[in-house]
Image: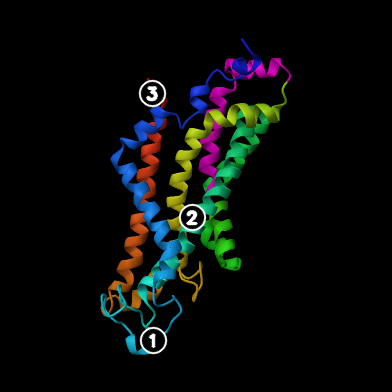
Amino acid sequence: MSDSSLLSPSVVRRRWWHNRTLGRFLHHRLACSGLVVIMLMTLACAIGPLLLPFDDLHIDLRARFAPPFTGWHLLGSDSLGRDNLARLLMAGRISLLVGFFSMLLSIAFGAVIGIIAGYYGGRTGAVLMRIVDAFLSFPSVFLLLTLAAFLKPSPLMITVIIAITSWMEVARIVETEVRSLREREFILAAKMLGLSGRWIMFRELLPNVVGPIIVAATLTVARAILLEAYISFLGYGIQPPLPSWGNMLNSAQQYLVRAPWLALAPGLAITLAVTCFNCIGEGLRDALDNRNQQ
């Protein structure tokens, strides 16, 4: 038996994208539908504003509160005559980018903390997990609003703030998985061969916990989109004239009776994006479940 096979007895687990796992995911109708919708939303937000006759900052006071399907305003216009569809798609760029990059930051930081705590255990693991518990003891919404109130609310800063309040659950998941794997034969063999702790953590353990991390990533994106919408709705997030789904809802709340379409469009976009990411996460969880590997 070669050293590589000794160190990696769970090759199938590492290859989470293998045919059987992919087949189970493709048979999950809700997950596939969610993936298709998210891809279409992303594509629409990326190229849609380039195809419209108006940009998101174009003001036409003569078209104030135009209802949907009035002329070129397919989703109507707002109180300044700005095209609602152009603003919705541009806001989608901001909201989806904030959700995606805050997910990357929180997954990276939480995974590193979880791997270190799970691998070393003892006092090191206890200290790191008590730090996680300390962050979890604060209601994330209040922590998020506190940070947003004292820091400049740019898209980059909002992304960092959301990541700061979202990494703890990832750390807990990864720490639990690593703790269950650190006494396995391939880890003991790696130690006997004299491999460093860094190699074992990031070349042996990390590939074996990639499944739970991917599932957590999809759910973290959904949570980040909701948090961005929440703090922007309260006025602490993305600031006008830069649109986001949250501040579009904030601007529309005073016109709910006169122009309900101003709130319906971003509200439905948030609901659709979050629901689709949750469906993708559920599909990935079922596809990567070891009990389904048979």
Q: Earlier in the sequence, mark 3 or mark 1?
A: 1
User: Which image quadrant for residue 55?
Assistant: bottom left
Q: Residue at x 32, y 67 (%)?
A: 265
Tag 2: amino acid? Gly
Tag 1: amino acid? Asp
Q: Residue at x 64, y 33 (%)?
A: 116
Residue picked out by circle 1: 60
Q: Is residue 246 visible?
A: no
Disc 3 to disc 2, C-alpha distance: 31 Å
Residue picked out by circle 3: 291
Is residue 267 placed above or below 252 in the rendered structure?
Answer: above
Numbered circle sitting on residue 49: none
Residue picked out by circle 2: 99
Which segment did they paint magenta? 165-194
Q: Earlier in the sequence, mark 3 or mark 2?
A: 2
Query: Of helix, strand and loop, which one carries label 2?
Result: helix
Is residue 231 placed above or below 71 in the rendered structure?
Answer: above
Q: Pick out the residue farthest to the top.
A: 1
**Mark 2 nearby-residue class (10 Å; few <14, some 14–19, many ≥20):** many
